[in-house]
Amino acid sequence: MNVLVTGANGQLGREMQRVGSLSPNNYIFTDLAELDITDKSAVEDFVTKNNISVIINCAAYTNVDRAEDDEQIAELINATAVANLAVAAKNNNATLFHISTDYVFGTDGNTPRTEDMEVNPLGAYGRTKLHGEQAIAQIGCKALIFRTAWLYSEFGNNFLKTMLRLTAERSELNVVFDQVGTPTYAADLAVLIFSIIEYGIYEGNEGIYHFSNEGVCSWYDFAREIAVAAGNTQCQINPCHSSEFPSKVRRPAYSVLDKSKVKRTFGVDIPHWRESMLHCLTRVKK
């Protein structure tokens, strides 16, 4: 079986490369240089010529602040390109795995978000990601959509790596405590997707799923745990309000994802965020 992975140079894409190398199936990893997913005909040709059975879309425009000024580009990558992949999947009877975000929700409520809760994006990033979900539904291809949050890994730029650097360099740091959610180790999400594909349990289980690690914390809590685990205890980390960091977009104050559906459907055992954070730090040190 041939499996196409787009956005292969990103955080999740790099983790998919790691697990994909263990498969007897043929994983084909592409990024912009190999396949421009905003080009509809190029996507259709690639999927058809390579006899693709499964598409894993790890490509996304994820800069939340910049998306406010670059909404057209964000829409192109997060929605138009997704529609291109969905059309190619439908025309070739392939299954599309797509990664979405907690940002499709607004700020109301303080209970974990289930898949059927009302969506109300606060900014351009969330809007364009929601448009991608809606495009998949409208086109009607076989698809599994995984909404995730606070993604980090040993690759690329992310909160964990930024905190490692800043807590090593500075004596004091302010981190917001009024945004609550759950960190997600990209390797854990990659293992979930890989397992679903390798065990062939995606057929008949199409739909939207939520996935993050277990547990709940604020960005302040996450930063403190990173610093302590890394031994950067000389840096004093202070809790502060989001208003102290002016931004063009409001971020969800509460974005904990309810993972009951993904655990029930696929029998997955999800690690706690602290456990996964420590595992990632071990890899970063290596």
Image: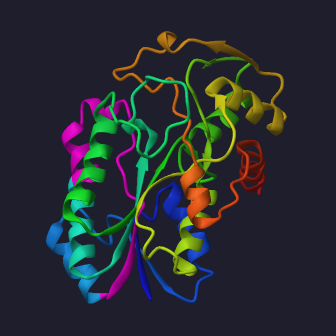
What is the quadrant of residue 28 in the picture? bottom left
Viewer-closest of 166 and 217: 217
Residue 55, relative to residue 123: is it above or below? Answer: below
Q: Is residue 213 magenta?
A: no
Quarter in which the N terminus is drawn: bottom left
Residue 283 location in percent, x, y?
74, 56
**Can residue 54 be seen at all in this image of the molecule?**
yes
* 279 with respect to 121 (left or right): right
Residue 146 location in percent, x, y?
46, 55
Quarter in which the C terminus is drawn: bottom right
What is the quadrant of residue 214 in the picture? top right
Residue 94 location in percent, x, y?
33, 79
* Point 66% across, 34% down: residue: 216
Viewer-closest of 235 and 128: 128
Viewer-closest of 244 and 3: 3
**Can residue 190 be seen at all in this image of the molecule?**
no
